[in-house]
Image (cartoon, helix red, strand yellow):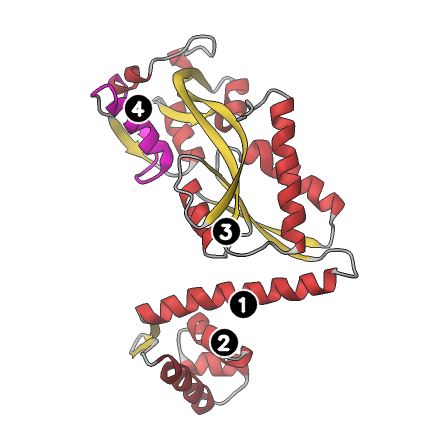
Amino acid sequence: MDQRKIQYFFSVIEHGNLSSAAQSLRVSQPTLSRQIQAIEEQFQTPLFVRGGRGMLLTEAGRQLHEGLQSIERQMRLLKNDVAAVSLEPSGEVAFGIPPSPRGLIAVPLVKSFNAAYPRIVVRIVEETSGQLRDLVANGMLDVAITNTNEPLHGIASQHLGRERMLLVGPASAKLSMRKETPIKSLAGLPLILTMRPNSLRLTVETGLGLHGLQANVRFEANTLPLMTDLVIAGLGYTVLPVCGVRALLKQGHVSASPIADLSITWMVARPKTRSLGVAAERFYEMLCDLGRKQVRDGVWDSTT
């Protein structure tokens, strides 16, 4: 697979048919068709289903596409790293962050990094911790914040800090940050939780299971703003880290109470089987420094 064949393959996927892809590439349709057939012969399997709806990827084609995306990105990063040996670092960093620590970490981190390395582009992906772990493991992200409740296969990790988990309810519930809530009390409340196998959902269910109880899940949502909107509307309670509702608590839109013996440990993940490029290594170091600052400032507890 040379660079030209990869470009042809990607173009057919993007356009969904040979004629539009050929026009975009400025080659004839028979030429493009022969190149796609050559790729299929190389891998000894059909990569597209050809029909009235155009060219659709087979499962084998999807697997090849994912692998080539990672390889193509690594080649671009390698090119940037070679150039950065004698020049100011440039290129890109792909960074993943879950919704909860976004407000606490993302903006100050990116602002500081941009001031220090203005030629580096930062691509930010916001997903659940489990999805971010997988994206780091398969090479689509360089660095991501996740937590210790997620499996660690395929990544190397460094602890950042620990914080309390809160029972979050509408302002009318008058929950108090000065009074703990036993985890077994959650069983009697209508809950708004993330979907399985999200680690937040499993943490709540496991904690209740230790007392022989089950969670009364009324609504499932995997985005933090939607979860808190439902809470504010009085439709139930949710469980979130302190950093996820800090602003809403300050504004008085919700009330919250620490859940006894329930916390989350944030960590930064990086690939286990490959080294980071120059740009990503600088970003990783700055993220770890910011985590240590949160601990020094008392925002997070130390994990050591």
CB of mark 4 within 8 Å of CB of mark 1? no
Q: Which residue is mark 3?
A: 272
Q: Nearer the viewer, residue 12 or 129?
A: 129
Q: Which mark is residue 6?
A: 2
User: Do the residues bearing badges 1 and 2 touch, measured as CB atoms within 8 Å?
Assistant: yes
Q: Is residue 190 magenta?
A: yes
Q: Tell which circle, 4 or 3, labels the residue nearer the N-terminal end.
A: 4
**Callout 3: 10 Å neighbours few (<14), some, many (20+)?**
some
> Which quadrant of the figure contains the C terminus?
top right
Start-end of magenta stretch = 188-212
Q: Quadrant of residue 217?
A: top left
Visible residue check, residue 169: no
Q: Amino acid at mark 1?
A: Glu
The quarter of the picture where residue 15 lies is bottom left
Dot 4 corresponds to which residue? Answer: 207
Count of number-bearing discs: 4
Residue 262's disc number: none
Badge 1 is on which residue?
72
* Depicted 74 relative to depicted 132: above or below: below
Of 261 and 49, the residue lying toward us: 261
Residue 223, position in %: x, y?
41, 38
